[in-house]
């Protein structure tokens, strides 16, 4: 055996020791992060769950994210985009905390400074929110302080352990450790060990986790929104709409229900935590260019003449053939009636709704007052609005995508002008009006389905909200267009379902396309365009294999 081979195990010993030490140092960083986040959650139980450091930073990140990246996130992750964002924030925090722990092992103040910087970042994020007040900074400040102190204490314990290892007596025949980082340290009466470091680190992580869970539980306990929503008695409509006829929905297996269940209704918004509003404390301000500003409580809103509206709502982020569209029966007070009561002044051309969380959505005012049934909705599908869909009140204005018509958790309506104010999405380059594009979606057969040769049923859904759908056509493999059979028309504000029979389908791979014509006679364009900035366009297609 050569001398090099004989000495290799000895050389691996110090290297392994350094790896163990680095891992231990990283663990102290994670412990400090757990302490910071736990402390922040405890304080957020008082200031509100949306002020917790991770949520505040995530909300600020959403506001700062370029529009193209936001669209990519919605397109790629769908309604899981928020979970992906929060997961990314936690992963980044873990990596930076590990780095801070390693830095603190060498220079405790430097590692503590990283956590202090975390706290300052969270403070800025909390105060950057549109509806923020000074108290919202408290969770991040406390989190930064807790993380810095914990990192400093754990780093000193770890360094004390290193001094013990550096000054221990050497065994007979063993060379003393040579480590430049310890040569200037003097041994003292240190009674610590790596086991003590691991115990302190593990205990801190456990305490931090308990604090985080406890803080979130306290927030949930303090939040009485669920019970308050359950206690709300929604009055019936003054003139209830009749049930929708069964003929609006073709009897085709696999076709979407005509009315979307509340549980399946899509949700696309920027809220990382759902705004929790006690309806007993809720009030809506109607202000701006009006003669008589109004302040309406929830009880007063329920005493209005409530109206029902069957309406198909769609999201501008929906790709051609996408899932972000749904139909429900809304119930609420007439928005035009309340605006007329307030007295709209000449020159006003925009109505801006503001959410509890600061989101602003602008709608052309002339479209709200042109006779369409626009609502301040308090219920959907016969029950009070779910929190995720805007409880206790949201706006619903037919003819527009949600980003210019559907303000959830509504607390303020400002009558203004387009020249005076750009709402949230307009500032990010989206179309100012947001009129719904004509669209048709193939649902049966499903994409890449295998179907038997012969007669094949094709079915789907089309919408052109507030214009209505007059026709749907289907073609196979770039052949001639065949007019589909439309189900009963339930109204211009609703989608329309359709079906047709593909006669004599032959084996092989085939492409099916569909296009719609709205009630004004305008045919859906074939030009393919992404959702940004005014909604996706193009014909939906699907590929199937006939066997």
Image: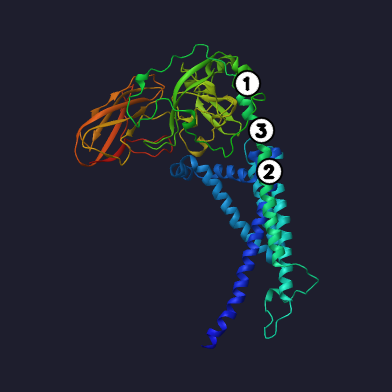
Using the numbered discs, state the Cα–Cα distance from disc 3 to disc 1 in whole angstroms.
18 Å
Depth check, mark 3 against mark 1: the one in front is: 3
Which mark, residue 167? none
Depth check, mark 3 against mark 2: the one in front is: 2
Which mark, residue 298? 1
SS assignment at label 2:
helix
Who's the residue at 72% across and 52% down the image?
A: 146
Return the residue at label 3. 223
Which mark, residue 214? 2
User: How many numbered marks appear?
Assistant: 3
SS assignment at label 3:
loop
Q: What crowding class fits label 1: few (fewer than 14 Cα within 10 Å), some (14-19), or many (20 or more)?
A: some
Is 397 placed above or below 209 here?
Answer: above
Percent across and percent down for residue 332 are 54, 19
Q: Quadrant of residue 131?
A: top right
Percent across and percent down for residue 84 are 52, 46
Using the numbered discs, state the Cα–Cα distance from disc 3 to disc 2 in whole angstroms.
14 Å
Q: What crowding class fits label 2: few (fewer than 14 Cα within 10 Å), some (14-19), or many (20 or more)?
A: some
Inspect this view and state whether residue 512 appears: yes
Describe residue 522's horizontal placement relative to residue 295 as left or right. Answer: left
Is 139 placed above or below 261 here?
Answer: below
In the displayed image of the protein, which residue is found farthest to the top?
239
In the displayed image of the protein, which residue is found farthest to the right?
189
SS assignment at label 1:
helix
Describe residue 78's horizontal placement relative to residue 154 as left or right. Answer: left
Q: Which residue occupies the foreground of this view, 482 or 135? A: 482
| Label 2–label 1 contact, CB within 8 A | no
Mark 3 or mark 2: which comes first in sequence?
2
| Label 3–label 2 contact, CB within 8 A | no
Quadrant (top left/top right/bottom left/bottom right) for the C terminus: top left
Percent across and percent down for residue 382 are 51, 21
């Amino acid at each position: 055996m050569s001398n090099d081979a004989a000495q290799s195990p000895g050389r691996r010993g110090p290297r392994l020791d350094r790896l163990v030490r680095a891992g231990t140092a990283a663990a102290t960083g994670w412990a400090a992060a757990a302490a910071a986040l736990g402390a922040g959650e405890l304080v957020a139980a008082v200031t509100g769950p949306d002020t917790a450091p991770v949520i505040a930073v995530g909300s600020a990140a959403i506001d700062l994210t370029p529009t193209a990246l936001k669209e990519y996130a919605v397109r790629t992750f769908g309604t899981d985009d928020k979970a992906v964002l929060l997961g990314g924030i936690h992963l980044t925090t873990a990596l930076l905390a590990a780095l801070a722990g390693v830095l603190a092992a060498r220079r405790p103040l430097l590692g503590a400074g990283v956590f202090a910087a975390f706290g300052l970042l969270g403070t800025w994020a909390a105060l950057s929110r549109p509806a923020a007040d000074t108290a919202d900074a408290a969770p991040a400040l406390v989190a930064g302080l807790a993380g810095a102190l914990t990192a400093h204490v754990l780093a000193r314990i770890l360094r004390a352990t290193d001094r013990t290892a550096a000054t221990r007596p050497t065994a007979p025949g063993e060379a003393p450790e040579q480590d430049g980082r310890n040569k200037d340290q003097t041994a003292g009466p240190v009674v610590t060990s790596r086991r003590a470091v691991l115990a302190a680190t593990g205990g801190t992580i456990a305490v931090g986790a308990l604090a985080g869970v406890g803080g979130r539980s306290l927030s949930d306990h303090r939040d009485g929104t669920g019970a308050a929503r359950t206690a709300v008695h929604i009055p019936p409509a003054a003139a209830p709409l009749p049930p929708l006829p069964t003929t609006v929905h073709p009897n085709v297996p696999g076709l979407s229900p005509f009315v979307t269940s509340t549980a399946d209704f899509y949700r696309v918004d920027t809220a990382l935590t759902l705004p929790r509003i006690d309806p007993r404390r809720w009030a809506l301000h109607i202000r701006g260019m009006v003669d008589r500003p109004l302040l309406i409580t929830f009880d007063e809103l329920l005493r209005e003449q409530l109206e029902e509206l069957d309406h198909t709502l769609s999201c501008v982020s929906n790709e051609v053939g996408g899932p972000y569209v749904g139909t429900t029966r809304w119930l609420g007070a007439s928005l035009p009636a309340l605006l007329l009561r307030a007295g709209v002044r000449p020159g006003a051309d925009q109505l801006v709704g503001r959410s509890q969380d600061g989101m602003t959505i602008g709608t052309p005012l002339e479209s709200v007052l042109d006779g369409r049934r626009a609502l301040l909705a308090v219920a959907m599908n016969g029950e009070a609005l779910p929190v995720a869909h805007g409880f206790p009140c949201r706006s619903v204005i037919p003819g527009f995508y949600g980003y210019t018509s559907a303000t959830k958790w509504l607390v303020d309506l400002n009558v203004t002008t387009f020249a005076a104010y750009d709402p949230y999405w307009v500032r990010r380059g989206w179309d100012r009006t947001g009129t719904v594009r004509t669209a048709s979606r193939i649902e049966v057969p499903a994409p890449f389905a295998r179907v038997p040769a012969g007669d094949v049923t094709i079915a789907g859904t089309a919408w052109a909200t507030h214009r209505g759908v007059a026709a749907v056509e289907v073609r196979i493999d770039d052949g001639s267009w065949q007019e589909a059979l439309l189900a009963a028309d339930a109204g211009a504000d609703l989608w329309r379902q359709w079906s047709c029979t593909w006669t004599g389908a032959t084996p092989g791979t085939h492409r099916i396309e569909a296009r719609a014509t709205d009630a004004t006679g305008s045919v859906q364009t074939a030009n393919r365009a992404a959702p940004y900035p005014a909604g996706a366009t193009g014909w939906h297609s699907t590929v199937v294999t006939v066997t």
